[in-house]
Image (spheres, rainbow, N blue to C red):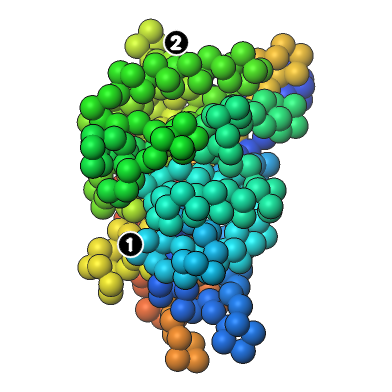
Amino acid sequence: MQVQKEVNIETEKKDNIKTIEIATTGDILIHKEILATQYNESTDSYDFKNTLQYVKEYLSNADLTISNLEGTLSGIENYGFSGYPSFNAPDELADAMKWSGIDVVNNMNNHSLDRDIRGFYRTREALENREFHIIGTRANAGENRYIIKDIKGIKLGIISYSYTMTAEGGVRGLNGTPISDEIYPLMNTFREDSLEEDFQNMKDEIDKMKASGAEVIIFYMHWGDEYELEPNETQIKIAKFLANNGVDITFATHPHSLQPIDIIKSEDGLHEMPVIYSMGNFLSSQRTERIQNPYTEDGVIVFVKINKNEDTGEVKVEYPTYLPTWVNWYGKDGQLFYEVVPATIDDASYLTEEGKVRVTESLNRTKEIIESYSDKIKIR
């Protein structure tokens, strides 16, 4: 499937073109500072809607929106809510994500076992109860490792994978926790020292998605080195493999900083695949004041339009566009608040004078990184 830059409107009408748009974000990380600000002591409850209120229109207006939940929804009874290094957020976070327009949740990342096996199952249950579509994990070994979404007559095959590390005993692990035999079959994983085997597994899933009618194949990867602004060799190797095997779009998270968007050509020259090496943090409290790293304040919402000629059945994917985002940080009534805002708007009433300066700095950082690999990538 060829990637196209734009569609001529006259041709669109003549050829009966149907267009959908998907949106994706990076990591949603609920650190202890955000937990504290979203708690209402008088009602003994949480509400996270304000954290996403200024980007809700972009998420909800897309035909399908995908995001990464970094951590668990394991309940308070036996675990307690917490941030780094073991994330466990209240179910109200999922309510806010649903309210904001997120449809698909990536549930496979290095924090998926932050509350052990019980937390793994409890998180999936909380997401399923809110009718999210879940990628990266499955409820049982009989389910597919991917989902097929029919969006206005265009069938999307969507799957995600997360890196794993070697844990005690040589088994795959997440943050040092071994993945047990019980749930290993329920997770989509890869490891640097077993890439060839993992590539075959990915290829099998690509073939299954196509056999199930998927017209567009979307991968969502959790990979890379934290806080790096460039992809590492493994990211590039995997991206080339996916392009050579007909994947149409690859989105990615984990570094907690942005990395470029590139357009990769397959070795036979017949296929192009946009890869977003890292969409950075979407919502977190990782800021310059806390970890001396301004790049963790920045994120993007990436948009991709997909066009289908209903007369011929041909499907084409446009080059991605993106909206830079920034986590606004301000004090009110003795508390600090964190809210995701568009970084393209520097005169909004919700920004302090310092915020107006910093959101512009964020925008400049984002443009420099995201557009550094390809002149085809533009702000939406």
Answer yes or no: do the residues labelled 1 and 2 have beta carbons within 8 Å?
no
Image-based side of 73 in relation to 369, left or right: right
Check the image and name the residue furthest to the bottom: 333
Q: Earlier in the sequence, mark 1 or mark 2?
A: 1
Give the residue at x 25% y 41%: 167
Q: Secondary structure at mark 2?
A: loop
- Please give the residue where the numbered disc 1 appears in the rendered image: 85
In the image, 297 versus 161, the foreground residue is: 161
- Indicate the position of residue 149 as horizontal and vertical percent values: 67, 32
Q: Residues within 10 Å of mark 1 (few under 14, many from 20)?
A: few
Tell me what residue is drawn at x 38 percent, y 8 percent. Answer: 268
Residue topped by disc 2: 270
Measuring from the top left, give residue 115's x and y in whole percent: 43, 57
Q: Is residue 262 above or below residue 357?
A: above
Rendering coords of residue 296 (x, y %): 33, 59
Residue placed most toward the observer, 134 or 299 = 134
Q: Which mark is residue 240?
A: none
